Image (spheres, helix red, strand yellow):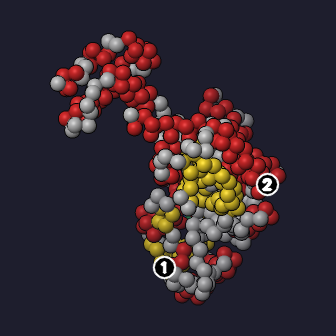
Amino acid sequence: MLLRQIPSVDHVLGQESLRSILNHYPRQMVVDAVRKVLDRQRKQVLRGELVTISHQEILSQITAEVKKKGENQLKPVINATGVVVHTNLGRSLLAQKAIEHLVEVAQHYNNLEYDLEQGKRGSRYSHVETLLCELTGAEASMVVNNNAGAVFLTLNTLACGKKVIVSRGELIEIGGSFRIPDVMARSGAILTEVGTTNRTHIYDYEQAIDEQTALIMKVHKSNYKIIGFTKEVGLEELVTLGQKHNLPVIEDLGSGNFVDLTKYGLEKEPLVQKSIAAGVDIVSFSGDKLLGGPQAGIILGKRKFIEPIKKNPLNRALRIDKLTLAGLESTLRLYQDEKQALKEIPTLRLLTFPPAYLRRQAFRLKKLIQNSFDEKILKVGIKRSVSKVGGGALPGQELPTFVVVIKPAHISVLELEQRLRVARPPLVARIEEDLLCLDVRTIQNDELKLIPQIIKQALDKGHDQGN
Ligand SMILES: *Cc1c(COP(=O)(O)O)cnc(C)c1O
């Protein structure tokens, strides 16, 4: 009986209330949504989950389905996790000037590979090379798609079929399956591990050198720390050893940082300028971690090693695109004035927010939420907590922050957290001590006012399902 009450596809498509959807979305998309919803109803009837067929309900499910299909899958998300460089949420936010630059380059033809003065082919790398060299003291530079690409390209160019010496304590894995030993194997370089997990001495490196050795490599332990009985060899010492044996020394710095963050109360994160000053032959790092630019892999160092890297045919497969290059150039320009960099590059600004500002923002958010909900539905408070840097930088750093805590009366905190993730726009939060925590450090100013409405959606959704 019930199955017979489910309308046909044609009947549904002829409904007046679907007209506006049909006018706004491709017909095939609507037809697919109608089929999907009717099929779902049929299955629910067969499983005994549905006791009445409501045409109203069918139409609203179809509308929801089409709207979901019709919107972009990659979309803005509100980051309330307090993780500043959140790799899963797109790492760094770009500075306004970087955004404007990349939009401008996207809208017009440009001199990506054209030397305007000479009137002939130019190099895409030239646009950032001078800036990078001035900011860091390096002789030459090169940029690629990301730091994984930078490490791969460097190893492939300088050590294919030859040995590369790395300390056992630095054979890192970072998220998304980047592992130094695996990247090295694919590059054609042969890994020579030296030392132990917690201690590596200069003599470990020296004893491993033979006629097949091409490079000495240092990797920054970005996302973990070894504490206790430890020993690691500094870059200067490795450079001296390299010079003695006529071997280049390369460094994978991971995050890449130009500003001494200890001045702003943060822990020490290695500076790119320091590595160059220490005489490293090649150093590489990401554009979108602490640096706060777009995804990119930046390679700096001595010209005699950068030149062959630029000529490697694999470079073409790893090359940086024009939009990224525009975003990168503008971000680097901001570093010409440290004050400006801290003010305008969101990653640096978020990391150095004064506690009083965070406290104020938390009170603002608490008030916004309190004004929208009865205490019987939702309890709101503020507590001290810690934000994280993320992106494999400063792994031990605790950034004191203020979070707005929420406890819903009728659903679990876990349920609320899940529903907020699928709201429009999605809001990603964390849970601490059975409270939903919204860390204001990573919530942007214009996002604050959207939050009550997002919470309402999440709470109402349960109400709908209950019916
Ligand atoms: C993050 C990181 C990488 C990879 O950089 P991507 O830009 O994500 O490709 C490589 N090495 C270290 C040490 C890192 O921290």
Number of the label disc, if any, that sits on residue 270: none
Tag 2: amino acid: Ala
- Whether ligand 1 has any atom under 8 Å from the Cβ at mark 2 is answered as no
Nearest the viewer among 28 and 259 is: 28
- Earlier in the chain: of badge 2 and badge 1, it is 1
Tag 1: amino acid: Glu
Q: Residue at x 72, y 44 (%)?
A: 364
Q: Would you name the residue on which mark 1 appears? A: 193
Mark 2 to mark 1: distance in Å?
48 Å
Q: Is residue 320 visible?
A: no
- Determine whether, in the image, residue 318 is placed left or right of residue 122: left
Few, some or many residues within 10 Å of mark 1 (<14, 14–19, 20+): some
Q: Residue at x 69, y 35 (%)?
A: 100
In x, y percent, where is residue 181?
45, 69
| Local SS, label 2 | helix
Q: Would you name the residue on which mark 2 appears? A: 356
Q: Residue at x 54, y 78 (%)?
A: 169
- The C terminus lies in which quarter of the figure? top left
- Determine whether, in the image, residue 423 is placed left or right of residue 341: left
Q: Residue at x 58, y 62 (%)?
A: 392
